[in-house]
């Protein structure tokens, strides 16, 4: 919604200021000229949700986070392999002591 519609909706439809729009409030507001005037309404597909700069910044941060997670994953895999090797060595020592 554009600023005109926001103002219209916020201050003229919700007449009792309870931040809810009752059926009666809506029906009363829908009879007004401003409500019917198509120039006051902007559909969601007409709005730019994010600027190109915001989208690029988001993609940059996402890529950075993916890289950091991949590095953590690689590090955890190396730790797992090292722990597995230690476990195998301890198992071998335990087997030797049991003989």
Image (spheres, helix red, strand yellow):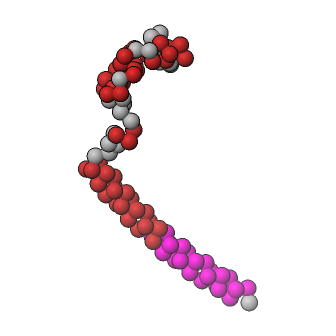
Query: Furthest residue to the left?
Result: 53
Image-quadrant location for residue 95: bottom right
- 45 to 59, vertically: above or below: above
Residue at image x 34%, y 56%?
Answer: 59
Residue at image x 40%, y 14%?
Answer: 32
- Quarter of the figure that contains the N terminus: top left
- Quarter of the figure that contains the C terminus: bottom right
Identify which residue, 35 or 53, lies in the foreground.
Answer: 35
Give the x, y percent position of residue 81.
53, 77
Residue at image x 73%, y 85%?
Answer: 98
Q: How many marks?
A: 0
Give the x, y percent position of residue 20.
50, 19
Query: Furthest residue to the right?
Result: 99
Q: Magenta stretch?
A: 75-98
Give the x, y percent position of residue 52.
27, 50
Identify which residue, 78 or 21, lies in the foreground.
Answer: 21
């Amino acid at each position: 919604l554009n600023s005109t519609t926001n103002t219209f909706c916020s201050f003229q439809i919700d007449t009792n200021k309870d931040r809810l729009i009752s059926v009666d409030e809506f029906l009363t507001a829908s009879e007004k000229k401003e409500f019917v005037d198509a120039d006051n309404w902007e559909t969601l597909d007409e709005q730019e949700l994010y600027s190109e700069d915001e989208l690029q910044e988001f993609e940059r941060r996402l890529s950075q986070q993916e890289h950091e997670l991949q590095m953590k994953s690689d590090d955890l895999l190396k730790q797992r392999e090292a722990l597995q090797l230690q476990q195998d060595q301890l198992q071998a020592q335990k087997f030797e002591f049991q003989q």
